[in-house]
Image (spheres, helix red, strand yellow):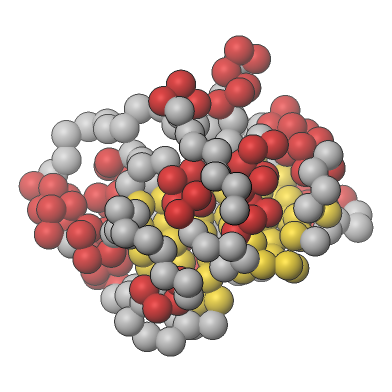
Amino acid sequence: MTEPHRTRATEAFFGRRKGKPLRTQQAAHLETLLPAYKLDLASPAPSDIRTLFAHEVDRLRMEIGFGGGEHLIHRAVENPATAFIGVEPFVNSMAKLVGQIEARGAENIRLHDDDATQVLDWLPDACLDQIDLLYPDPWPKRKHWKRRFVSPVNLDRFARVLKPGGLFCFASDIDTYVNWTLQHCRDHAAFEWMADNAADWLTPYAGWPSTRYEAKAKREGRKSAYLTFRRL
């Protein structure tokens, strides 16, 4: 088996790790609750990732950079038979979500608080049914485009861990990043864009909860695109 590409420090796909000081309860959540939901990447991944969850699940879905966690917690509560892996390196966002997991009893979530490529390289082949990359940092300056998460090497990672027929869902309000993603997925042999007409990519996903990023885009007059690619 080929040794997976490892992310170097200079290839970080995210910016700052922490914002405002955490409130006392948020800090306590990180210390006492996060360990119960955090993936142990120091140990080999089980051949069946579903065994990491306390109850039986029939699908496995990963959200990369869940931000405020509104979408992830909504989907987890809405779909208890689906297991979710949420990745977010921003400490404040992780603290907020962990509190929500506890409050809403979403036991079908596991977490990683660092680079998503670490999880992608740890997972076994063809284990995921879906990957969500929703409103990622667009890195708008051309010199920073290499830090965009959608890249040939990361699409290779997606292709390895997605099951045949699995989905890669991407949402953004930044036209240049939407076009970037379309071009990169078009050029990758493992993915096909599922849109037949404009409504397919201008219409939010079924059951879509509005997020703060989407609300900001609307306030600032930007339209969002919702792209779905299928793993061939």
Q: Is residue 83 visible?
A: no
Across and down, in percent, residue 182 comes to 79, 40
In-image side of 210 versus 45 (left or right): right
Q: Nearer the viewer, residue 40 or 222?
A: 40
Q: Is residue 105 above or below residue 94?
A: below
Quadrant housing residue 118: top left
Q: Is residue 204 above or below residue 219?
A: below
Residue lying furthest top: 143
Q: Is residue 107 above or below residue 30?
A: below
Across and down, in percent, residue 217 comes to 59, 37
Residue lying furthest bottom: 56
Q: Is residue 231 visible?
A: yes
Residue lying furthest front: 1
Across and down, in percent, residue 156 comes to 67, 46
Quarter of the image for the C terminus: give it.
Answer: bottom right
Residue at image position (73%, 67%) is 164
Q: Nearer the viewer, residue 104 or 159?
A: 159
Q: Nearer the viewer, residue 202 or 76?
A: 76
Across and down, in percent, residue 30 comes to 18, 52
Residue at image position (73%, 51%) is 227
Residue at image position (45%, 54%) is 122
